[in-house]
Image: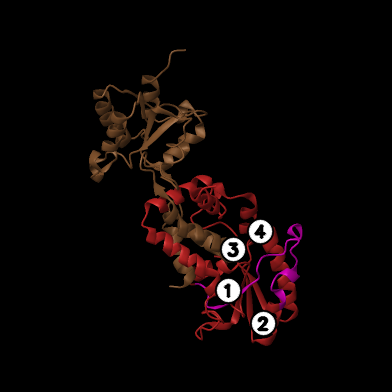
Chain colours: A brown, B red
Amino acid sequence: MTTLEKLIKSFSRLPGIGKKSAGRIAYFLLKSDPALCRQLADQLTNLHRLIIKCSVCGNFTEQDPCQICSNPSRDPSSICVVEEAQDIQTIEETREFNGLYHVLGGSISPMDGVGADDLSVAQLMRRVTENPVREVILATNPTVEGDTTALYLQRMLKERGIAVSRLASGLPVGGDLEYADRMTLARSFKGRTVM
Amino acid sequence: MTTLEKLIKSFSRLPGIGKKSAGRIAYFLLKSDPALCRQLADQLTNLHRLIIKCSVCGNFTEQDPCQICSNPSRDPSSICVVEEAQDIQTIEETREFNGLYHVLGGSISPMDGVGADDLSVAQLMRRVTENPVREVILATNPTVEGDTTALYLQRMLKERGIAVSRLASGLPVGGDLEYADRMTLARSFKGRTVM
């Protein structure tokens, strides 16, 4: 296999990149300034060397605790539980939440052999016991696995007397009733709000 | 900017990768084995170091002349002219052509200030003069620029008494008349073949 073929193969292993896109990227890099390749190579080399997991919330960070956990202006009594670290970035962009996060590292999925022990559930329980946490917002995905995980956590947290809420599920903003699937529409009825 | 943000920015500069996809790739790499990152970094470092342009046809290669130009079983009397080196790969996959290639490095486009002097036209003329070339197949893209380039080359090659042909343009195989655009349909009429 040639150097070019090897690079195309590596790129096509990345999510969302097929063989055609990988080829396009490889030829693009070949025709670009070698500095672009060098920069990308350096950044890839640094990735695992510089980025660690926050020992408090599990977010990816270059300092421990992470910038969110160590920010004194954030409310430590409110914790938002997410499945993956990248969900933090997505939620941060909405600027709706000023508390701290907790990354589970996935969702409970018996089909895939993932149980609560494989997720950072024990760490979450320790966090809410050792710190004055008032509210936990469950922001797992609105999927079967995400819902199962939310239900499981809700029971454990309620026992500890903590207010638990779940992100609203319903019609996406700018969407069209006509194109909404049955499940989403049913949820938006159940979760309808008083005007 | 953090290491992660820098990597996401670099990825989003690649063709076909937006900010969202770049983020997905970066997090995928973070969660994957560091070996994958190292491998990709090495391949990127090697890319410009190991790959050169074939001095005969302009194809990207690790040996000069390239594997196609130096293959004795290929027919040197037939040259297929393409705009970009990646077009060679695409044509090779069809296994329809057993001659040699010539990479122009683009197409004539007065709008972008690209003239014949910016392409390897002179090299092509030298090739057909110095070698016993019988036929030249113009495989530039079926666009205004590709057609202009083909017309320009056709005139120059005809003067030298070389048979010139152009790839057929028309309905894509498996396509539907209903969805064909007007220009493509018009071309498929002009280029209709006797049954």
What secondary structure is marked by label 1?
A: loop
Residue type at numbered disc 2: Arg
Tell me how far mark 3 sits from mark 1, CA to CA.
21 Å
Q: Is residue A89 left or right of residue B53?
A: left
Both labels 1 and 4 in a single chain: yes
Q: Residue at x 31, y 23 (%)?
A: A162
What secondary structure is marked by label 4?
A: loop
Tag in front: 1 or 4: 1
Q: Is residue B108 found inside the magenta-colored segment of the image?
A: yes
Q: Which residue is mark 3?
A: A35
Tell me how far mark 1 sits from mark 4, CA to CA.
22 Å
Tell me how far mark 4 sits from mark 3, CA to CA.
32 Å
Instruction: Tell which subunit mark 3 falls on.
Output: A
Q: Residue at x 54, y 63 (%)?
A: A38
Q: Which residue is mark 4?
A: B143
Q: Which residue is mark 1?
A: B59
Instruction: Tell which subunit mark 4 falls on.
Output: B
Residue A71, horizontal then vertical, whole percent = 47, 35
What secondary structure is marked by label 2?
A: helix
Q: Which residue is mark 2?
A: B127
Residue type at numbered disc 3: Ala
Q: Which residues are magenta?
A: B96-122
Which badge, 1 or 2, is on the more N-terminal residue?
1
Looking at this view, is A177 or B24 the one in front? Answer: B24
Tag in front: 4 or 2: 2
Q: Are marks 1 and 4 in contact (CB under 8 Å)?
A: no
Both labels 4 and 3 in a single chain: no
Tag in front: 2 or 3: 3
Residue type at numbered disc 4: Thr
Q: Is residue B148 left or right of residue A190?
A: right
Q: Is residue A110 left or right of residue A100?
A: left
